[in-house]
Image (spheres, rainbow, N blue to C red):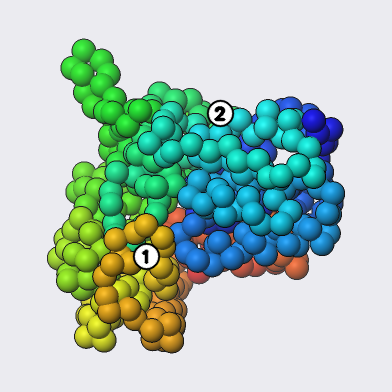
Amino acid sequence: MTSAKSVAFHTLGCKLNFSETSSLSRLLEQEGFEKKEFEEKADVYVINTCSVTENADKECRQLVRRIQRKAPESLVVITGCYAQLKPKEISEIPGVDLVLGAAEKFNIAQHIRELAKGDSAKICSCDIEEVTGFHSSYSVNDRTRTFLKVQDGCDYNCSFCTIPMARGKSRSDTIDNVLKAARGLAESGAKEIVLTGINLGDFGKGPDGAGITIGINQREENFFELIKELDQIPGIERYRISSIEPNLLTNDIIDFVANSDKFMPHFHIPLQSGSNKVLGMMRRRYKRELYAERVKLIKTLMPHCAIGVDVIVGFPGETEEEFKETFDFLHSLDISYLHVFTYSERDNTLALTLGPVVPQHVRHERNKTLRNLSYMKMQYFTDQHAGQTRKVLFEKHDKAGMIEGYTDNYIRVTTPHREEWVNEVVEWKL
């Protein structure tokens, strides 16, 4: 049995992972562990993994090697999506002591107490079908913007994605629980909450994946109802919707954000491809025409709104013509920035059976082309607002004497550090 007293965390992947890491950290601190920075020496290192891309897997291995060099006697715990998908593979990485799957990550304190260095790696995992229940998570004190997890899992079956296998079926917190968490965050001094989930717009399914029914009318909870209720919480000045599927981003949601003082004019909407043929092969649940309609409505109601886009390049069978279709489509849209992902093969996905395979060098060229387009889009969006005064929430980080913050519509502002501006909303002329 371990007598570990200090713990350090490292997070790979999405905002949801950051919220869960923060919650795991608080769990262990309540159990008497002292939290250390990952670069410091600790008794236990916890790596919360992602497995969206091959790089995330590689990065996990590199982090374990770093720990082995720096603190060979320390315990190494791996959790997160990679841990659920490939527990045996991870357990064979030299230096790993414990692998916690999706059902066990929030029992981390008990598992660490029972660990001893030198034993063979212990795997605590189960089939993803057995993973039910919803664990509320939020990040606090780590950054000014608080990531609040309200939904987990996914019932979609996109052909390139392992997330349903790593996270299980779609399930959510209740609106009452989310409101309680938001009130607590307001009391702790949080100014901005970022709502996070794996498929956020699918909010409304209970911990077992079934619909939640409430009240006399047996009304099902949904994401639109959630944001209307959150808008009433005193103390929280800003909300952001982290990422929402275009087919779940309803006109009602867009209209509500346009008329809300608290929900920021900023959407992040995954596209993945601008070619309807490729979208079909990806098993996405919309066509490019619907995506264009959503962008047009947002910009009609909120010309100043920032719109971020996820896109994948080099998907199996993506021809030069189809990539050009994607480029031209993105070029034509009034969007603000892109998150560009190079397709990487994931085990047990339908995409592996598709073809022909796009060569790696072609994938990288396409990635570079879209990243250049993203830079141009962001420059244009920023230039459009030059001379305007917008509200900026400045963050806690002091980077070489500078402080950073974001406007309501997600334009980054950097200026010499002033302590009195930390976690404050400041009127700022761009």
Any part of residue 158 in sight: yes
Give the Cα distance between marks 1 and 2. Answer: 32 Å
Q: Horizontal and vertical percent for residue 331?
A: 28, 79
Q: Which residue corresponds to the image point at 26% horizontal and 45% vertical from the top-left? A: 253
> Does label 1 or label 2 sit earlier along the sequence?
2
Q: Residues within 10 Å of mark 2 (few under 14, many from 20)?
A: few
Q: Horizontal and vertical percent for residue 423?
A: 62, 48
- Which one is nearer the viewer's eye here, 270 or 158? 158
Q: Which residue corresponds to the image point at 29% horizontal and 25% vertical from the top-left? A: 212
Can you tell which mark lies on residue 184? 2
Q: Is residue 347 left or right of residue 90?
A: left
Residue type for callout 1: Asp
Q: Is residue 62 left or right of residue 278?
A: right
Q: Is residue 341 left or right of residue 300?
A: right
58 in relation to 211, above or below: below
395 in relation to 214, above or below: below
* Element class at badge 1: strand
